[in-house]
Every structure is written in structure tokens, then in C-alpha cells.
């Protein structure tokens, strides 16, 4: 019997960022698989859900507000929202006070799909994080808070 010292993990295996990155990749891949039967990608779902959430706060959100809430860049959001509009899930209308801004309104079909997508996302979170979801959320919130608008 030898008394060899145990190997101490080194390199990326010691980095919380390494594990967060790979956990995020796995979560996104799982969400993508789970959203597929609804005909949505995670990006499409995030934009639709963000539009729905923001519209509950008062006036219809602008395309830029939806992009910011979802974490998408402006050009990506514009392209994806155009596709969602072509699918009849939302309408983009010029803002009366700012000709450069577009207001986003979910259609009935869009609201119904968002509702199903939200349940899918909740189920995915439950599947991935189980009983640790609340603790994990509380650890991640202060890290991500500067990126989330208002």
C-alpha cells in the first residue's frame, strides 16, 4: 500500500466559468430538443416570451426592448422576429412617436405558443436543475443582473 498524494484538479476543471459554460451548453441543447415539437428554437422562444412578458408591463414593447430582454443582438432579433411575423405569431408596427422604432404585439397564435413554450422551459429547468433550481438561480442572478434591462 502506497501513500501517494491524491491528484488535485488543475486547469479549466478548477474554473467555475468552465463548468457554467458547459452547463449552459447542455441546458440550451436540452431546451432545443424540448422546444422542437413546438416548432421553436430557443432564440425564437426567448424573443416571443420576452415580447409577451414585456407587453404585460404596460404598452407594447419595442423591437429593441424585446432584443434586450432576450439577450439577443439587434440584427439577430430583427431577422428572427421577421420570421415569427411571417409565421403569424406576432405583428411589428411602427411606433407613433418614433419612426425608427417598431412595436411588437403577439397574435393569439403567438400567445398560445408562448404559453406552451413557457411550460416546456419550466419543465426543462425542473429536469435539469431539480431541487437545486432556487439556489442556483440565487447564485446566478447577481452575476447576470447587469445584462437584464430594468
Image (spheres, rainbow, N blue to C red):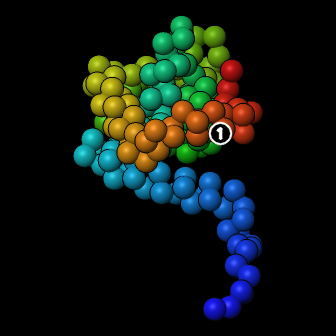
**Could you tell me residue 93's position as x and y percent?**
48, 20
Q: Is residue 9 visible?
A: yes
Q: Residue furthest top?
A: 58
Q: Residue at x 38, y 26 (%)?
A: 90
Q: Quadrant of residue 91?
A: top left
97 lies left or right of 143:
left
- Determine whether the residue tagged by mark 1 lies in a helix, strand or loop: helix
Q: Residue furthest bottom?
A: 1
Q: Residues within 10 Å of mark 1 (few under 14, many from 20)?
A: few
Q: Is residue 94 visible?
A: no
Q: Quadrant of residue 59?
A: top right
Q: Quadrant of the N terminus?
A: bottom right
Q: Residue furthest front?
A: 1
**Could you tell me residue 117's position as x and y percent?**
35, 34
104 lies left or right of 95:
left
Does 95 appear above or below 134?
above
Q: Which residue is mark 1?
A: 140
103 lies left or right of 108:
right
**Could you tell me residue 67's position as x and y percent?**
58, 34
Q: Residue at x 62, y 59 (%)?
A: 19
Q: Quadrant of the C terminus?
A: top right
Q: Residue at x 48, y 12 (%)?
A: 56
Does 95 appear above or below 148?
above
Does 90 appear above or below 30?
above
Q: Nearer the viewer, residue 150 or 66?
A: 150
Q: Nearer the viewer, residue 148 or 59?
A: 148
Total labels: the figure holds 1
Q: Residue at x 68, y 91 (%)?
A: 2
Amino acid at each position: 500500500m502506497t501513500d501517494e498524494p491524491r491528484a488535485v484538479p488543475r486547469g479549466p476543471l478548477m474554473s467555475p466559468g468552465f463548468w457554467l459554460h458547459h452547463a449552459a451548453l447542455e441546458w440550451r441543447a436540452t431546451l432545443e430538443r424540448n422546444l422542437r415539437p413546438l416548432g421553436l428554437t430557443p432564440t425564437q422562444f426567448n424573443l416571443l416570451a420576452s415580447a409577451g412578458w414585456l407587453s404585460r408591463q404596460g404598452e407594447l414593447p419595442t423591437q429593441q426592448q424585446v432584443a434586450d430582454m432576450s439577450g439577443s443582438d439587434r440584427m439577430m432579433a430583427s431577422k428572427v422576429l421577421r420570421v415569427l411575423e411571417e409565421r403569424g405569431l406576432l405583428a411589428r408596427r411602427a411606433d407613433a412617436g418614433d419612426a425608427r422604432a417598431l412595436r411588437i404585439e403577439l397574435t393569439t397564435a403567438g400567445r398560445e405558443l408562448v404559453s406552451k413554450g413557457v411550460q416546456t422551459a419550466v419543465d426543462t429547468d425542473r429536469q435539469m436543475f431539480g431541487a437545486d433550481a432556487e439556489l442556483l438561480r440565487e447564485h446566478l442572478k447577481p452575476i447576470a443582473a447587469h445584462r437584464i434591462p430594468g
